[in-house]
Image: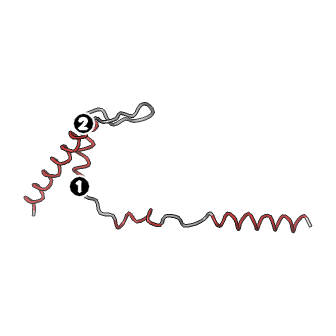
Amino acid sequence: MLTSNFVLATSLVLAATGAFADSGDTSINDWAGYSSTVTREQVKAELREATRLGLVCVGEGNIPIATAEQERMIAKAGQDAAKQFAKSDDAEG
C-alpha cells in the first residue's frame, strides 16, 4: 500500500512538473537571424567614450547615470566612427 501511494505521488509530481517544462519563448534563440544596425567600430567608439566619461563601472557600487549631454557625446563618437568606417570601406572597395 505504501509503495503504491509512493508511486502514485511520484507520478503526480512528475506529471505536474512536466507542465512547467514548456519550451517558452522560442525567439530567445533567434540570434542567428539577427542583423545589427551598427558596426563593431561604432560600438567600440561608444564604449571608449562612455569609459572616458566615467560611465562604465566594474564591480559593486553606484551605477553612474549619463546626462543628456554625455549621451549626445557617446552617440556622436559612434556616428563619427561609423562615418570613418564607411570612408575606409569605400576606399578599399
44 displayed left or right of 90: right
Quadrant containing the C terminus in the rendered view: bottom left
Q: Mark on residue 14?
A: none
Residue toward you, 43 or 17: 17
Residue position for label 2? 70
SS for dot 2? helix
Position in image of residue 39 (x %, y %): 23, 55
CA gap, disc 1 to disc 2?
Answer: 21 Å
Q: Most extreme residue toward the front, as rendered?
A: 68
SS for dot 1? loop
Is 85 above or below relative to 67?
below
Amino acid type of disc 1?
A: Thr
Residue 34: quadrant of the picture: bottom left
Position in image of residue 42 (x %, y %): 22, 50
10 displayed left or right of 27: right
Residue position for label 1? 39
Residue toward you, 85 or 55: 55
Amino acid type of disc 2?
A: Gln
Quadrant containing the N terminus in the rendered view: bottom right
- Residue at position x 87%, y 68% from top? 4
84 displayed left or right of 49: left
Labels 1, 2: front one: 2
